[in-house]
């Protein structure tokens, strides 16, 4: 390109198209065509499946965080490594399609995005965008095999803790598996009431809070780890409140709109509790970093 052309491009505020952009554009177009079906299925589940609805929040937030972080000043494209990661993503996409395994199909998209990022801007850019990539990965619903294995223990834990709280409040409650026997009434802690949905959402929010508010790996790991007991305890409280209202007020409060509203309110309480824990962890982190800088 001539000097005059470069001047014209700088005067108009545009950058001249480099030959290096062509393979990047071709790779992006090919990836878009190859992963269009998994992307459509994922968005459909975000919209229709309540277990995956948190993806509607996480995906836009991930895009905004990536845009806010921007590109590294010292970025260096790595075509060979990017090509290898893209090849691994294509292989994973092919194997997931053969096995009809949705999680593998969808995770291959995340791997392809990482490959394109490495191809265009280098591995350092992936490290800079670790939080957006993590949020996108967390927006993918877990495989049915995993959710089935986790749901049953969570059901039993919520049932036992809820029954214990009811007995503590002098409500005659007998526990049989995931069924709480009340006088003239039975409470079934079903898979939908296991707390797995709130646990997945709280873990995602814990990663988001830890990535935005905290700076050290131990503090971030602490907040993400605390999301698990917070979700379990809040779900047990939900079972307790349901039994308490059914026994003392009206059996109809244990089902329908009221039961759903109670779940949403308690999730807000869980999120506030997790935020308070993150605030405490941030205060401890600032104090620790301050002492370390003075030493």
Image (cartoon, rainbow, N blue to C red):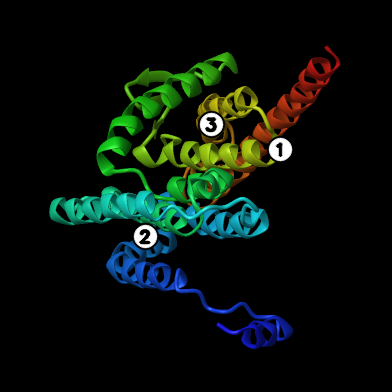
* Residue 261 pos. (x, y %): 57, 49
- Nearer the observer, disc 1 or disc 2? 1
Q: Secondary structure at mark 1?
A: helix
- 177 to the left or right of 91: right
Judged from this view, the residue extending furthest toward the left is 98
Quadrant where the image shows the N terminus: bottom right
- 156 to the left or right of 121: left
Q: Secondary structure at mark 3?
A: helix
Q: Residue at x 62, y 54 (%)?
A: 65
User: Which mark sits nearer the N-terminus, 3 or 1?
Assistant: 1
* Residue 284 pos. (x, y %): 76, 21
Tag 3: Cα neighbours inside 10 Å, few (<14), some, or many (≥20)? many
Give the alpha-carbon distance from disc 2 to disc 3, as whole Å.
25 Å
Which quarter of the figure has residue 28?
bottom left
The residue identified by callout 3 is 231
User: Which mark sits nearer the N-terminus, 2 or 3?
Assistant: 2
Tag 2: Cα neighbours inside 10 Å, few (<14), some, or many (≥20)? many
- 106 to the left or right of 288: left
The residue identified by callout 2 is 42
């Amino acid at each position: 390109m001539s000097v005059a052309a470069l001047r014209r491009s700088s005067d108009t505020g545009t950058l001249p198209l480099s030959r290096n952009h062509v393979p990047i554009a071709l790779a992006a177009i090919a990836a878009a065509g190859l992963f269009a079906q998994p992307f459509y299925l994922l968005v459909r589940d975000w919209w229709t499946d309540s277990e995956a609805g948190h993806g509607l929040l996480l995906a836009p937030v991930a895009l905004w965080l990536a845009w806010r972080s921007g590109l590294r000043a010292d970025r260096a494209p790595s075509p060979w490594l990017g090509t290898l990661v893209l090849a691994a993503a294509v292989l994973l996409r092919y194997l997931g399609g053969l096995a009809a395994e949705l999680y593998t199909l969808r995770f291959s998209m995340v791997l392809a995005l990482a490959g394109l990022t490495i191809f265009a801007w280098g591995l350092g850019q992936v490290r800079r965008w670790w939080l957006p990539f993590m949020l996108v990965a967390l927006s993918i619903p877990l495989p049915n095999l995993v959710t089935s294995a986790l749901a049953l223990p969570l059901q039993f834990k919520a049932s036992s803790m809820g029954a214990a709280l009811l007995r503590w409040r002098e409500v005659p409650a007998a526990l049989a598996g995931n069924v709480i026997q009340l006088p003239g009434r039975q409470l079934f802690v079903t898979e939908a009431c296991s707390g797995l949905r709130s646990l997945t959402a709280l873990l995602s929010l814990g990663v988001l809070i830890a990535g935005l508010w905290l700076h050290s790996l131990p503090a971030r790991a602490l907040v993400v780890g605390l999301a698990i007991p917070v979700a379990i305890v809040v779900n047990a409280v939900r079972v307790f409140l349901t039994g308490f209202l059914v026994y003392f007020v009206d059996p109809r409060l244990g089902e329908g709109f009221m039961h759903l509203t109670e779940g949403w309110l308690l999730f807000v309480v869980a999120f506030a509790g997790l935020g308070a824990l993150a605030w405490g962890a941030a205060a401890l982190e600032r104090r620790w970093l301050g002492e370390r800088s003075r030493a």
